[in-house]
Amino acid sequence: MTPLLEVSGVSKSFGGLRALDNCSIAVAEGEIAGLIGPNGSGKTTLFNVITGYVRPDSGTVAFRGLPVPAASPAGVFRLGIGRTFQITRIFGRLSVMENMLVATQRHESWWRSVARSAASRAERGRAAELLEFVGLARFAGTPAGRLSYGQRKLLELAYVLVADPAVVLLDEPAGGVNPTLVNEIAERVRELNRAGKTFLIVEHNMELVMSLCHRVTVMHQGAAIVSGPPEAVRADPRVLDAYLGGEDDELVGAGGDARG
């Protein structure tokens, strides 16, 4: 079966730093795939290549079996590849609903007046449904900048879902988020996945990764070194060595955080 999203032999250097080194990963349709690795292993650079923020020096990205052309992030988004960021990108002065209406325009330069006037009744309905889904409906009129960090993560997820992408890339969805909202985010991801949505998740919270993901790929020094079911990956000596030089307490411990 052709993967929904496939990265083949991608390399990228920044000056003398080789951020990606012949990196290859594949994400099957309908799965929740995890991408882990020590800080500096190339995870965010890989996300940036997939979503058009960075052009690789070599290698290819394919979506639905077809090469993804060199394009802007907006162009990649229109293909059906959505993405959130480690540091949320929302409009803090706009209300939560206005953020969602900006998302219906799929263009980050729209201002408040455009968001208010351009959204159709159907778009407003879709925005309201998604806010209800992520538990933010009661904050629809609240400036987004007043939300907690976890709530901003949920808003960004809802923002991406407006366009109904085929695959969603989540960059550290649990980073800086309290445990209650981490569980809320995980449940929303599971529910979306049961409905057919595909996910690729970069995350340092190992407890979340091991409980949420169907398959986990480990990156080290710009390359994917191991890929498989969570339990097999967690026990693989190459993974323990890549993270901690053989010390596995943080990687396998309950609630461990593998930040290196």
Image (cartoon, rainbow, N blue to C red):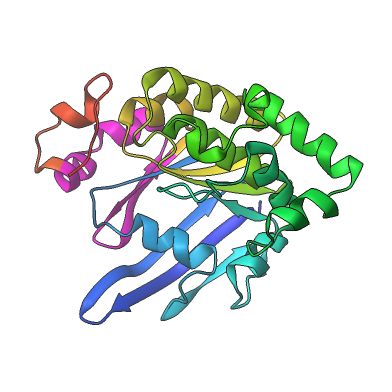
Q: Is residue 173 left or right of residue 161?
A: left
Q: Is residue 46 visible?
A: yes
**Position in image of residue 236 (x %, y %):** 25, 37
In this view, 152 is above or below 21: above
Residue 156: where, in percent of width, then height? 56, 42
* Residue most extreme to the right: 121
Horizontally, residue 134 falls left or right of residue 231, namely: right
- On whether residue 236 falls in the magenta region, the answer is yes
Q: Residue at x 63, y 71 (%)?
A: 68
Residue depicted at 63% across the width and 37% down the height:
96
Viewer-closest of 28 and 178: 178
Residue at screen point 52% across, 48% down: 84
Pick whichever, 49 or 27, lies toward us.
49
Residue 146 pos. (x, y %): 49, 34
**Along the horizontal axis of the image, is 113 left or right of 173?**
right
**Residue 140, quarter of picture:** top right
**Residue placed at 45% from the left, 72% from the top?**
54
The residue nearer to you, when weighing 210 against 44, is: 44
**Magenta segment:** 216-243
Asked if the stretch drawn in magenta spans residue 118, the answer is no
